[in-house]
Image: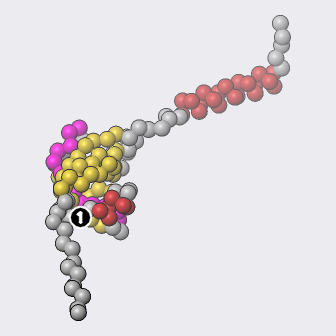
Amino acid sequence: MKLIRSGTAKSASFICIALLALLVGCKGPTKLKHFPVSGEVMAKSVSSQEITLRHGDVPGFMAAMTMDYSLPNAAVLDELQPGDRIAAQIAVDPADESHFWLEDVVITAEVARKRAARPEPSP
């Protein structure tokens, strides 16, 4: 039978306890929750990267209302105009359900967009 020195045993015990503590303390990556939503863009703010969306009920998450949503994708924000109807996914951080934003935004109906008429060149 082989004897283990007490210093080696203490080190091995310490390593096992440290690894166990790490495993218990690690929750791993949290998976975002997603909820489908559709509604009308009421306003947008480029500076805060948000839109105000009037939407119907979002089953399992919230009742119908008008509220602001963050849009992390600036290109999508540039395309949206008040009056547009959209379909999207509300992404929710399960660790903090007060932290949510819109993803996978699709414009389902565009408002009649006014385009400045270009003046005719003079002869």
The magenta stretch is 48-60
**Could you tell me which residue is drawn at 30 percent across and 67 percent down?**
45
- The amino acid type found where label 1 is placed reads Gln
Rendered image quadrant of residue 63 = top left
Q: Is residue 118 above or below residue 20?
A: below
Rendered image quadrant of residue 76 = bottom left
Q: Is residue 9 above or below residue 36?
A: above
Q: Position of residue 6 (x, y in %)?
A: 81, 21
Say left or right for 93 vs 107.
Answer: right
Whether residue 98 is visible: no
Say left or right for 59 vs 31.
Answer: left
Q: Is residue 27 above or below residue 107?
A: above
Q: Position of residue 68 (x, y in %)?
A: 26, 58
Q: Quadrant of the C terminus?
A: bottom left
In the image, 49 versus 12, the foreground residue is 49
In the image, 39 versus 15, the foreground residue is 39
Q: Position of residue 30 (x, y in %)?
A: 44, 38
In the image, 20 versus 107, the foreground residue is 107
Residue, disc 1? 81
